[in-house]
Image (cartoon, coloured by chain):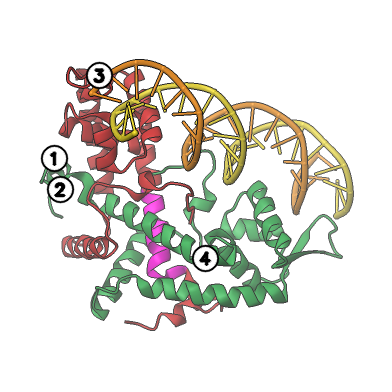
Chain colours: A red, B green, C orange, D yellow
Amino acid sequence: MTDVKERFGIEPGGGGPLDSLGFLLSQLGFEGSRRFHAALAPLGIDPRHFLLLRFVAREEGRSQQALGEMLRIPASRMVALVDQLEERGLLERRANPHDRRARALHVTPAGRRLMSRALKRATAHEMSLGTTLSDAERSSLVALLQKLAVEMQLTSGVHPGLSVEHEQPED
Amino acid sequence: MTDVKERFGIEPGGGGPLDSLGFLLSQLGFEGSRRFHAALAPLGIDPRHFLLLRFVAREEGRSQQALGEMLRIPASRMVALVDQLEERGLLERRANPHDRRARALHVTPAGRRLMSRALKRATAHEMSLGTTLSDAERSSLVALLQKLAVEMQLTSGVHPGLSVEHEQPED
DNA sequence: TATTGTTATACTCTATAACTATA
DNA sequence: TATAGTTATAGAGTATAACAATA
């Protein structure tokens, strides 16, 4: 490994901690999210809605709690998220005949139409990233990030920003 | 470029948008930040304080506004951030004899002592990332991320999460 | 008249824990 | 007695715009 300490000098021009792997990931993750957020904004949803809507479509009919556990979204956050999607008529809470406490979540036709539009924007966003990299570079970058994701025990499709309880980092 | 559309299928097992470059960066950036936040917490500061304190040390005596412009931190956020660091005795606002409106920022001796401890933790955090990668993989990952940072017009040492006005993305 | 830094206000988001209705 | 989902409350963080002192 390259000498990590030299990246932490406070001398100007020396790079600083600013070109560290951690800082780069934080900058890029945040900036990418900001752009994705902007890409979805015209549709009236944000990345959390997009993620949840996709999951509901994939796990059609599951209870609100089951979905929340899969995505590791705390129950009280789920309420607001599902409320917002339901208000826009994108998904429905249906009664479960076997357990009247539970709410089965279903995507509505309008929800599917919006998902299709959102998917186009998400794809365009994804394609807008890494345009200065060659095909080989882009694949190798994704592979390395996946290796890092395994190391950090991240789960595919589960965003840590939705799972966190108590305090939120900004940097 | 690998076919980006196939990453966006909603079929389970197909990967989903979840292994996209954008989503990976967001997950990793957030999780890394969360860990860095936790690493600094015992010292009573968070990553924003660490970044600002380092900058003040590097640009000793600059005005609060000049620092804010360099880091692209809105003026009203700077007040709270500097307040917190001053309350802990880590930096001082000094009068500027040439312009009595301006406040020159200086790191105190206690601030330098704390920075040294924080630097150790930051280094340990940085070294804890990428331990499952070979030296060559780690360097190539950093190089690719830097290329992406250039593409996205990010500035070394400036975190977009501190610059944003109006709305904050979470994903 | 413009600028530096501060503050007052209102707004959004959150965690927590209490709560309802079911099981 | 436990669980699914909801809500009430209080706290943290923010943007905005107004503000005082100084230029």
Q: Amino acid at mark 3?
A: Arg
User: B110 or C19: which is nearer to us?
Assistant: C19
Which of the pair A19/A1 is nearer the observer?
A: A1
Judging from the image, what secondary structure is the residue with disc 3 in?
A: loop
Indicate the chain on which mark 1 is placed.
B
Q: Nearer the viewer, residue B171 or A163?
A: A163
Say if mark 3 contacts mark 4, CB within 8 Å.
Answer: no
Residue A121: in magenta span: no
Label 1 or label 2, whichever comes before in sequence order: 1
Query: How many labels, in total?
Result: 4
First-in-chain label (4 vs 2): 2
- Residue behind mark 4: B40
Q: In the image, which is nearer the foreground, mark 4 or mark 1?
A: 4
Query: Can residue B171 be seen?
Result: no
Left or right: where B6 falls relative to B80:
left
Q: Which region shows up in magenta?
A: A18-32
Give yes or no for residue A21 being in the magenta stretch.
Answer: yes
Quadrant where the N terminus of chain B sits is bottom left
The residue at 10%/46% (across/down) is: B13
Within-10-Å neighbours for mark 2: few <14, some 14–19, many 20+: some
Under mark 4, the amino acid is: Leu
| Pointer 3 chain | A
Residue in the image at 56% along x and 64% along y: B51
Q: Are marks 4 and 1 on the same chain?
A: yes
Query: Which x, y percent locates residue A101?
Result: 28, 22
For mark 4, give the secondary structure: helix
Q: Residues within 10 Å of mark 4 (few under 14, many from 20)?
A: many
